Image (cartoon, helix red, strand yellow):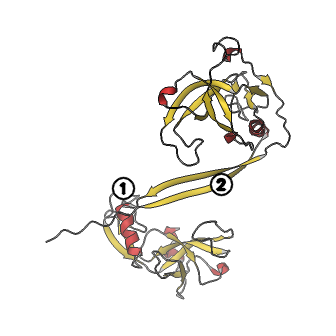
Amino acid sequence: MTAASPPEELRAPLVVEFPFTRSLGPVQSAFLTGLRERVVLGVKTSDGSVMVPPVEYDPTTAEELRELVEVAPTGTVTTFAWNARPRPNQPLGTPFAWALVRLDGADTALLHALDAPGPDAVRTGMRVRIRWAAERTGSITDIACFEPYEPPHAPNGPGGPAATTPTPHDGVFPEPVTGIVAPARLDYTYGPGRAQTAYLGALAEHRTVGERCPSCHKVYVPPRGACPTCGVATTDRVEVGPRGTVTTFCIVNIKAKNTVNDAIEVPYVYAHIALDGADLALHGRIGGIPYDQVRMGLRVEPVWTEGGRYPDHYRPTGEPDAEYDTYKELL
């Protein structure tokens, strides 16, 4: 007798990505516009210390801060970490150090890349200076990186950090930067595990399979591998549906770019659906009915496309609506 082969281990590369847009107040606007002009600005706090990058409110007293000062483009490394394998879109394409640099005239440190030939060339206390980007637009990337710098005099002598005094600055520049768009991106590999692998395998066969808790006997779809209420493993598989009941829903009026729903005309309805035999509602799109006729209690069934690994959408079955008491615990 031969042992059964273990199920295929499912893995998939996934990307979560979105642009984050924010407006800038007077302090951040002056700081980023200053970088465009190769000027580094900090802000004075209530105790007279200088923060770079500047903040809009005092971290101790919470009072609004507006007194801007200019600091030097040179500074001292306070700590660092070597990055041997730069990722895409990082400041440098070759190995570099992430360093906290306290610019001369500042009392706090700025995090940025430090270009150095190797980890042995970086040390706490080393002197560095800003390498400006060739093209500057009013962004933290206007600082291309920091680079090692040998001052013409002793560190604490003339021209050293102790001799640097921040000078007042009005923060006024032509064509100030008033907003930024920061792309956020997370690349990762998803492994669904035992319970989700079985669930996805069943979906490929146009079946929906959940798992029952041996203690409270609730059936979870999609299965989680363990009961969130009792904390025990769920291994008893139960096929549910395929029909179910709309418990609650929302009307989508804005298209989501670069998603599977990108081609769907708005408005459309996305709903929580309690499949028959399940004790947890899953979500799905409702089709085959005008969006303004979707309602709680509507009985629906899945619609599969050719070769689809999951239902494309759910449509009304034509059955009478379910009574509220039959699904109120699943809202």
Residue sitting at x 36%, y 64%: 195
Position of residue 266 in the picture relative to residue 312 (left or right): right
Q: Quadrant of residue 264?
A: bottom right
| Residue lying at the far bottom of the rendered structure | 318
Mark 1, Cα crowd under 10 Å, few <14 / some 14-19 / many 20+, is few
Question: Is residue 269 visible in the rendered structure shown here?
Answer: yes
Name the one closer to the observer, 194 or 220: 194
Can you identify the residue that label 1 sits on? 231
Question: Residue 108 placed where, x, y %?
Answer: 64, 27
Front disc: 2 or 1: 2
The amino acid pointed to by label 2 is: Pro
Q: Position of residue 54 (x, y in %)?
A: 71, 33
Horizontal placement of 168 versus 52: left or right? right
Residue drawn at x 55%, y 78% is 297
Q: Position of residue 185 (x, y in %)?
A: 57, 53
Please, what secondary structure does the residue beneath circle 1 have? Answer: loop
Q: Nearer the viewer, residue 122 or 317?
A: 122
Answer above or below: position of 315 versus 28: below
Q: Which mark is residue 221?
A: none
Q: Is residue 93 left or right of residue 156?
A: left
Q: Is residue 314 above or below residue 48?
A: below
Residue found at the far top of this picture: 157
Residue that carries the numbered disc 2 in the rendered image: 19
Direction from residue 301 to residue 265 in the image, left or right: right
Question: In terms of depth relative to the viewer, which is nearer, 98 or 27?
Answer: 98
Q: Residue at x 79, y 31 (%)?
A: 66
Residue at 37% across, 76% down: 239
Q: Secondary structure at mark 2?
A: strand
